[in-house]
Image: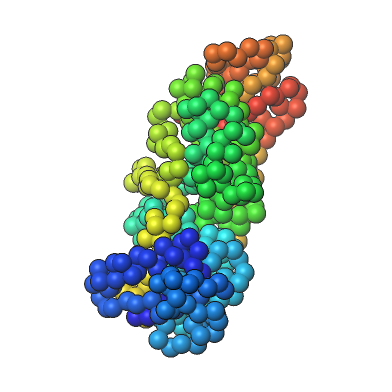
């Protein structure tokens, strides 16, 4: 089977490296020889082994009958979408790590693949090298998924871990993350929660079989998290994590990306640094967690290559994926019940006690002039209304605290 790779950036070069280095083992597992025939990129790479297979014209790939699998690792929606759609229509399976493409056009591309008896595979689009797409689609089909929730962005998890361990503020750790290459010069996709939003859109779509548009997902980032918030979390024996969550409550599906203060009993409590983890809750299985490096050249490339092997093994057979294009109308998060960590000025303590049903107060070392507390469960909308009556310095949702 001949393979073409679209894009020779970080992930594309990793796919090429793995397929060259492990070609014998990969071919053995696939049941036939697999070889990279083309790599598409606008640039030239003098002295790089890719020179021998480098092309600049997509038509050479899509019109070559020898190409059975196309690997899309360009990123972005266009021209990736046009190339992937054309490749599928021309009877070639496609494997991608492109979360933007999958979140926006996944259902449509899966339907084309089904009609052509080919496959559109995207294991690497969520969690990098962590296997989660295939388990959701194949291994967990006996259960009704009650919730899929996770730490889906390594950059923000690294930053929150650094803020906790080094008593650093947001701006300090952002500069450090950028210096290490974890965060882009424009870090908005990570720190404002948009990256995690696209990933939870994909997972929620798979969990409930219908299209979830990431633009519809309530999204908060970590830009408002302070050293003081971290100090209170530590005092409560908790950690603050950016969580992406899709869950079904009383027949309604909710999806959200937001910081959450989680206690030691929570399965995601110990997930630190650049690691990702995804928690799936089934009605019979209970809790199951997938953990590992959620990004990086070789972990992500490894997941892409595993999809290539799957595509070759299922030549002429479509791997059924339950994700149709009918839009899933998400429930209004204002009706979702949550618990909250809240900080208000000390002189408004009595007002807070009158307004909120408080579970308990919190005290942090070296923090003065304010009153902090945990609420009992209340609807998101009720919290919004209550907070209009008082000066809220900070509020973070909580679980298992």
Rendering quarter of residue 276: top left
Q: Is residue 242 visible?
A: no
- State how the image is colored: rainbow
Q: Position of residue 180 (x, y in %)?
A: 51, 44
In this view, the residue in front, 381 or 297, is 297
283 sits left or right of 336 in the view: left
Quarter of the rendering containing residue 85: bottom right
Task: Please tell me which residue lies in front, 223 or 394.
Answer: 223
Answer with left or right where residue 273 lies relative to residue 242. Answer: left
Work out whether 84 lies above or below 237. below
Q: Residue at x 46, y 83 (%)?
A: 91
Q: Residue at x 60, y 66 (%)?
A: 77
Identify the residue shown where x is 52% and y is 34%.
160
> 311 above or below 283?
below
Quarter of the image containing the N terminus? bottom left
Residue 64's x, y, as percent?
Answer: 46, 87
Question: Can residue 172 be seen?
Answer: yes
Q: Residue furthest right?
A: 389
Figure disc tally:
0
At x 39%, y 57%, the residue is: 298
Image location (x, y in percent) of residue 45: 49, 71
**Is residue 293 depicted above or below 311 in this figure?**
above
Residue 171, given in percent of the width and then of the height, sits at: 62, 34
Among all residues in the image, which is located at the extreme front?
47
Q: Is residue 365 left or right of residue 25?
A: right
Residue situated in front as seen by the camera: 79 or 122: 79
Q: Is residue 320 left or right of residue 201?
A: left
């Amino acid at each position: 089977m001949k393979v073409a790779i679209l894009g020779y950036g970080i992930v594309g070069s990793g796919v090429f490296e793995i397929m060259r280095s492990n070609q014998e083992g990969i071919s053995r597992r696939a049941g036939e020889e697999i070889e990279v025939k083309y790599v598409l990129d606008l640039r030239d790479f003098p002295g790089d082994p890719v020179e021998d297979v480098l092309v600049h014209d997509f038509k050479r790939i899509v019109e070559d009958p020898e190409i059975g699998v196309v690997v899309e690792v360009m990123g972005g929606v266009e021209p990736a979408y046009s190339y992937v759609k054309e490749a599928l229509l021309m009877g070639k399976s496609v494997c991608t790590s492109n979360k933007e493409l999958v979140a926006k056009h996944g259902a449509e591309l899966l339907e084309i693949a089904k009609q052509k008896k080919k496959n559109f595979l995207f294991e690497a689009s969520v969690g990098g090298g962590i296997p989660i797409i295939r388990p959701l689609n194949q291994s967990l089909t006996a259960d009704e998924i009650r919730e899929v929730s996770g730490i889906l962005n390594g950059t923000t998890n690294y930053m929150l871990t650094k803020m906790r361990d080094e008593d650093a503020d947001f701006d300090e750790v952002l500069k450090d993350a950028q210096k290490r290459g974890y965060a882009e010069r424009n870090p908005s996709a990570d720190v404002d929660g948009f990256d995690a939003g696209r990933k939870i859109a994909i997972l929620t779509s798979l969990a409930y079989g219908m299209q979830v548009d990431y633009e519809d997902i309530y999204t908060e980032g970590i830009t408002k998290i302070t050293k003081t918030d971290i100090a209170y979390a530590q005092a409560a024996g908790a950690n603050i994590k950016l969580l992406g969550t899709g869950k079904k409550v009383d027949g309604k599906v909710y999806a959200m990306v937001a910081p959450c203060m989680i206690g030691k009993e929570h399965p995601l409590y110990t997930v630190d640094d650049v690691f990702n983890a995804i928690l799936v809750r089934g009605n019979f299985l209970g809790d199951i967690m997938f953990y590992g490096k959620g990004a990086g050249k070789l972990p992500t490339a490894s997941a892409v290559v595993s999809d290539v092997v799957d595509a070759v093994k299922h030549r002429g057979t479509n791997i059924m994926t339950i994700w149709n294009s009918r839009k899933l109308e998400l429930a209004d998060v204002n009706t979702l019940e949550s618990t909250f960590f809240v900080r208000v000025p000390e002189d408004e303590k009595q007002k807070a006690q009158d307004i909120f049903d408080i579970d308990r107060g919190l005290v942090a070392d070296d923090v003065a002039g304010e009153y902090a507390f945990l609420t009992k469960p209340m609807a998101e909308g009720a919290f919004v209304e209550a907070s209009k009556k008082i000066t809220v310095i900070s509020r973070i949702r909580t679980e298992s605290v």
